[in-house]
Amino acid sequence: MKASFLLLILLLCPMLAYSQTAGAGVEELFLAKDDGNGKAGDVVSSFFTTDVPIYCIVQLDSDKPVTVKMNFVAVAVAGVKPDSKVVTTSYTTKEGQSRVNFTGKPFDKWNAGKYKVEIYLDGKLAKDLTFDIRPASGSPDGAAYFQPKAATKPKPAPRPKKN
């Protein structure tokens, strides 16, 4: 009798542990530009280098407390080591909260390239989203900025003066 009771407890423990952590997932993940009033505006899939800040909105599928961490990663950006974390931040939700808003911004403007946001829930990767940041129209971030200048004729060295 004791053995069967112990066996029943051992079988139920993993199911109880699963039910306590189940539901802690990302229902929706999207990025948005600023609306001009310091809040998330239009949902977009790519940005310009002048779009500062970038908003990352995480909609959870549960309103149970969970620690949500965002890594803003430079995947393929000129002058930046691949897979460098540009912004890392986290927030622990309270009972009843199911949405987390993160913002990311550089000191000046973004470098053009491919980026991604990684969302972790309680330390486990839950979802990621890859996107591009393109040069703003007329800015020196584009390929023209890296084009070599036309070769100029070197100036001849000055000749020594005779006395």
Image: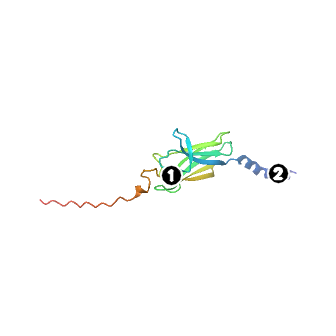
Amino acid type at image mark 1: Ile
Which residue does the image show at 41% across and 56% down from the upper left?
A: 144
The spot of residue 139 in percent (x, y) is 43, 50
At x 61% / y 48%, what residue is drawn? 29
Q: How many marks?
A: 2
**Residue 66 picture quarter:** top right
The type of residue carrying mark 2 is Leu
- Name of the residue lying farthest toward the left: 163
Q: Position of residue 112 (x, y in %)?
A: 48, 53
Looking at the image, residue 31 lies above or below residue 38: below
Determine the residue positioned at 73% across, 50% down: 18
Per the image, the residue denoted by label 1 is 133
| Residue, far top | 37
Could you say whether the residue bearing mark 1 is in a helix, strand or loop? strand
Q: Position of residue 87 (x, y in %)?
A: 53, 48
Q: Which residue is mark 2?
A: 8
Q: How is the image coloured?
A: rainbow
Give the percent coordinates (x, y) of residue 53: 51, 44
User: Local crowd at mark 2 within 10 Å, few (<14), some, or many (≥20)?
Assistant: few
Lateral position of residue 124 relative to residue 55, left or right: right
